[in-house]
Image (cartoon, rainbow, N blue to C red):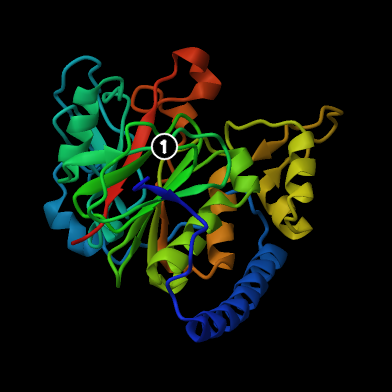
Amino acid sequence: MPVQNTPCECPVPSAFMAASFAAKRAANEEAKSRLLRQYAISPSVNTLRTKRSPYRAMASPTRSISVASSPVPIMVMVSSPSYTSLPPTSDAFQWTTESWGAALRCLPLGIRARHLFTTRQLELSSPLHVRALAEAVDARAVAMVNQVHGREVVVVRKGSPIPDRRPEADALISDAPEVAIAVRAADCVPLLMADRVRGVVAAVHAGWRGTAARVSVAAVDALAREFGTRSNDLVVAIGPSIGACCYEVKPDLVDAFAAAGHERYLIDRWFLSPPPPRGSMTRAPLTLDVPRANLDQLILAGVPEDQIYSSGLCTAMHLEVLTSYRKEKEKAGRIAGAIRANA
């Protein structure tokens, strides 16, 4: 089978791996200390920190439809369904117009690899739609997996054909510039990664189960094992997903994260329950911040925080553009995150 599930035989010399693991342990301790300090001094851990993008000035002259660069809504003329405007996103992201309609790209990641996040205009229900996705990132084909809410990683290698049957996994890594890799989501977190030195890439699907199982960290580890990637060379884009504003959960999810070995300070950071209004006996609903959890896990895995970019878009809040299983149930479509390796 040309597409191979990890783990597999390690191609990196053992001396290098030992030094890498020692350095990674030190980096993890430093990252953990930084997160603990942030948690201790922060008056609120409900939202991601807003970061000023160093690419804002560079991107402004080239943005044709970015709502972040203008206070006036931009009209997008497309076939049904039509959008009157696109929701604003962070400075590191830009709306673009593709053959099917709107798509979202991360500017810093775009310097390293061709990629995008689709909208509900591309239904991904036929080979024609998949071909349009491939063409949008200059690939001849798209490799996908049968997503099962776990932490398995599939390796797509240069020169290998795509199998007819999709393997069960929730992440893909690749060094093949002719083939894009993609994950689909309808509330879960789609993450795209690129190694700025080696040109290899990853696509990750992280729902709450995959997040509890650290699927994004599994992808980082697989990149290191298969292609020699160092975590501090990664640039990561976190695409649209359901936010803590809309993702109410039951207390048993807290137990699931604890059982998976996540430390208490992280669980308190990810699960949010605001105090009730004064005089009220009603307890506020418990919510889960899945994008924040994946961001923190990547930092602890050694990815620099200033190389991780979040779109900040909640799928449940923008149903005219995105899709949400929580809101639409079985009628929900899927968006995709697709990326291909550099030659």
Q: Residues within 10 Å of mark 1 (few under 14, many from 20)?
A: many
Q: Is residue 35 above or below residue 242?
A: below
Coordinates of residue 270 in the picture (x, y in percent): 66, 49
Q: Nearer the viewer, residue 324 or 2?
A: 2
Q: Nearer the viewer, residue 66 or 34?
A: 34
Residue at 69%, 68% in the rendered image:
36
Name the image quarter holding residue 22: bottom right
Which quadrant: the N terminus? top left
Coordinates of residue 282 in the picture (x, y in percent): 82, 27
Q: Amino acid at mark 1?
A: Val
Residue at 17%, 28% in the rendered image:
76
Name the image quarter holding residue 228: bottom left
Coordinates of residue 42 in the picture (x, y in percent): 66, 62
Q: Nearer the viewer, residue 332 or 59?
A: 332
Coordinates of residue 334 in the picture (x, y in percent): 39, 26
Name the image quarter holding residue 313: top left
Give SS at disc 1. Answer: loop
Q: Is residue 82 above or below residue 263?
A: above
Could one spot residue 287 in this view of the protein?
Answer: yes
Q: Is residue 147 left or right of residue 131?
A: right
Tell me the residue that label 1 is attached to.
145
Residue at 26%, 20% in the rendered image:
126
Q: Is residue 118 left or right of residue 150?
A: left
Which quadrant: the C terminus? bottom left
Could one spot residue 74 in this view of the protein?
Answer: no
Q: Is residue 145 above or below residue 213?
A: above
Q: Residue furthest front?
A: 1
Q: Number of labelled discs? A: 1
